[in-house]
Image: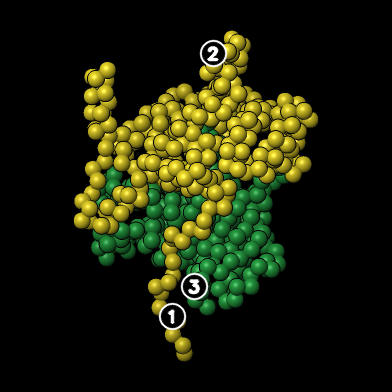
Amino acid sequence: MPTTPAVCHSLSRRRLLAAIVPGAFGAAAASWLGRPSMAADGGGIAAGAEALVRNFAAEGLQLLEDRSASPAARAERFRALLQKYFAVDAIARWVLGRYWGQFDAEQRAEYRRLFEDLVVYGYVKRFGEYTGESIRITRTQADGEMQATVFSAIDRPAGAQPVRVDWRVGGREGAYRITDVIVENVSLSQTWRSDFAGTIQQGGGPPALLETLRLRTTQLKADLGVRG
Amino acid sequence: MVRVIAAASLFAAAGCATPPDRADTEAYAEFRAINDPLEPLNRQVFQLNQALDAMFLRPLADFYRILIPPPMREGVHNVLTNLRSPVILANDLLQGEFDRAGTTTGRFVVNSTLGVGGIADWATDFGLPYHNEDFGQTLAVWGSPEGPYLVLPLVGPSNPRDAAGLAVDSALLDPVGVITLMGEAPEWLITASRVRLAMTIVDARSQNAEELDDLQKSSLDFYAALRSLYRQFRNAEIHQGRPPANTEGPSLDDIPPIPVE
């Protein structure tokens, strides 16, 4: 796609770099996290959300730094992290939007599985790009009783500006989950939603999305040398 | 002339997406939200842009990246950015952002002198970070709606507001553009201006090469993913990086409370 002035000034390198879907977790998970930010005083949800993000980042860092594990082993560890920290069901369902109703039970189950595979293998494929970035939580804000946003910055090697990552967290005490990751103001869920809706419309229905997801995840697994 | 208009409207008609029945409220709401009534035509232009990119621009950008060492490319990028200062300043002022106008002026002075014609970006080190402004953003601040999504030939993702902004920036707010428009530009300036445009395009493409590749690989429908990204980027830029809290997104409001044991 030619990127001439109008576009290039909008899509500057830092923002694009940050916005690319599978890049985000890789870099974001990569991290050492400092003390809790002082702003996390919005009561239960804010403190809980911040702890959740900090724990995810810490576990993610361990995974990223363990370069000896096989791609298959890394993928399974990442899948476990994803299920532990993210509201995968809610995200998968929201991403489908109004098309959820057009999927029957069997299609929903397959979609849910393929969506998770797309995330897992897409990110694991990019783990190699991790070059020691660190993440700082800058502040946390409660957006009501069941929603909070944790703001963070990923510091990049000398010279490059830090990348801003916001984590949307929802749920109740003891069951908080990340519901969206917003990298330099670009929401992953929102982007997936448009992407998937486009695929469904172009292909004419749920089978088109499932087929595209099957092809894509198979390809990702083949690239990683993961069988199954 | 009439034939041209007739042909153009036929072309436009061929490129129109059929709106869903208003009775189907969900589908109609989605159609409105996507705001891409020219989608079939846009997709064709997108394909054309991709083909042109693969044939000309991408190879050129790759050559540039292979042949020119990173510090030199950085210098070129800084010079091009510095040359954009008058446009950014004009838009800062038009939006009433006087602090940012000060930053832009300070950057221009520091980088044009200490930075030797803008090659080195000392201003950022002095606490004057870069920000972008353009007339598309100014129009948005003034309350103009964005209009339907457009993919412009050669330019890429846009909308009527940003397209008008691009025209105003290059012809009316850029000093070289103004001089050219008045017919006062000497030959060398016109040549320099063309070189600048070419370098801007190559610079932008080479900077974004890997990221665009990644997006293309990670998305299922590159067109739709880019459309969404473009809108989210522009929305953030218009709000100076702090868009109003977006409550759109997955939520856990409907999960049942954890049973008390």
Q: Sequence order check: which comes first, mark 2 or mark 1?
A: 2
**Chain B shade in the render:** yellow
Q: Which residue shows up at 27% across the image and 34% down it?
A: B15
Q: Is residue B153 left or right of residue A60?
A: left
Q: Nearer the viewer, residue B121 or A133?
A: B121
Q: Position of residue B252 (x, y in %)?
A: 44, 70
Q: Nearer the viewer, residue A107 or A16?
A: A16
* Residue A1 occupies quadrant: top left
Give the quadrant of the C terminus of chain A: bottom left
Q: Chain of mark 3?
A: A
Contact? badges 2 and 1 (CB < 8 Å):
no
Disc 3 marks which amino acid?
Met
Q: Nearer the viewer, residue B57 or B247?
A: B247
Label disc, if present, on residue B183 of the rendered structure: 2
Above or below, B254 relative to B208:
below
Contact? badges 3 and 1 (CB < 8 Å):
no
Q: Position of residue B11 (x, y in %)?
A: 26, 28
Q: How is the image coloured?
A: by chain
